[in-house]
Amino acid sequence: MRSLRTDLALEAREIYEEGNNASSIPGVKTDVKELEDCVVTRVEVLDEQGAQIMNKGIGVYITIESKLMKYDDDESREQIIKYVTDELRDILGNDKTKKTLVVGLGNWNITSDALGPKAVSKTLVTRHIFKNYNKDYDDDFTEVAALSPGVMGITGLETSETIKSIVDTIKPDRVIAIDALASRKMERVNSTIQISTAGISPGGGVGNKRKALNKDYLGVDVIAIGVPTVVDAATLTSDVLDLAIDSLMQQSTEGNNFYNMLKNLKEDEKYHLIKDSLDPYDQNLIVTPKDIDETIENLSIIISEGLNRSLHPGRIIN
């Protein structure tokens, strides 16, 4: 299961259940809520057993899936913002005295990785106002600071160390980290938002794991918000191969034993077979849709506005 690249707890659960012919996972609780034009799945990793099976930290993972995220119109965007805001309010709570640091992870020079920095640029920051007026509380707004720390290739600094230094200095009550993720299914790319209370490992979805940002390391609650913007080429090819085999089996009267043999390959065996075939061309091939520029802009608006409404109750919506 760990071979298939995915940051989504929903997909980690699906991979385990498919590979073990199971309908549930020990130490993991799942709840699915179907709304209008949207499916919200809550995967809760309860203990170390569930964390080891899922290869995810203990915590809650909420996945919002909707094709509306791919539509660049005000009505669709507003509907998704409401779904995101509702889920964020449940996680963040109603304590207006809590101080928040919003972090936009990722490389702003690479479009598919620029979700975090773009969302942070649209986030309403208020810490300077609270400090200037010596305020600890406001009915309509909470204290929010934000930054995009970049990546090691740009700054020469480990992202986690930068964030840890800022957390130790300004002492927020929680950190909200926004990042681009990786999916194992193309259908979920740019149409899924995951909100997690378990923190995040920057770069984990594309095999470039850095030190995890979580409560154990930072000393404060870490809420991660992410959207899968890429899919690993070997993983995508594996899914396409399954579809091709199914189609060939339906059309063929001979040679089904060969197709069944391919079909019955374990996921990790099939993944390594395809990955070995792709290695001569590129050892780390990642795929993203061609309209990624417009999509990242739209998704950054959805996430930032969902944050602004959940963090600032008095925010006026035009």
Image (cartoon, grey):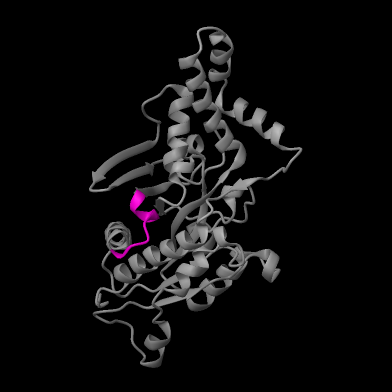
Which quarter of the rendering shows the N terminus? top right
Residue 318, horizontal then vertical, whole percent: 25, 76
Residue sitting at the far right: 280
Q: Quadrant of residue 221?
A: bottom left
Q: Which residues are magenta?
A: 67-74
Q: Residue at 30% of width from left, 74% of height from top?
A: 312
Q: Quadrant of residue 100?
A: bottom left
Residue 4, horizontal then vertical, whole percent: 57, 37
Q: In the displayed structure, does residue 85 sit left or right of residue 227?
A: left
Residue 164, horizontal then vertical, whole percent: 56, 68
Residue 19 visible in the picture: yes
Q: Residue at 59% of width from left, 12% of height from top?
A: 258
Residue 102 visible in the picture: no
Question: Who is closer to the viewer here, 59 or 295?
Answer: 295
Q: In the displayed structure, does residue 122 sit left or right of residue 167?
A: left
Q: Residue at 35% of width from left, 68% of height from top?
A: 305
Q: Residue at 37% of width from left, 55% of height from top?
A: 69
Residue 263 lies in magenta, yes or no? no
Question: Who is closer to the viewer here, 307 or 44?
Answer: 307
Q: In the displayed structure, does residue 98 sit left or right of residue 270?
A: left
Residue 22, horizontal then vertical, whole percent: 40, 24
Q: Is residue 249 above or below residue 125?
A: above
Q: Is residue 159 above or below residue 170?
A: above
Q: Is residue 232 above or below residue 107?
A: above
Question: Who is closer to the viewer here, 293 or 172?
Answer: 293
Residue 72 lies in magenta, yes or no? yes
> Most prominent secondary structure in the magenta stretch?
helix
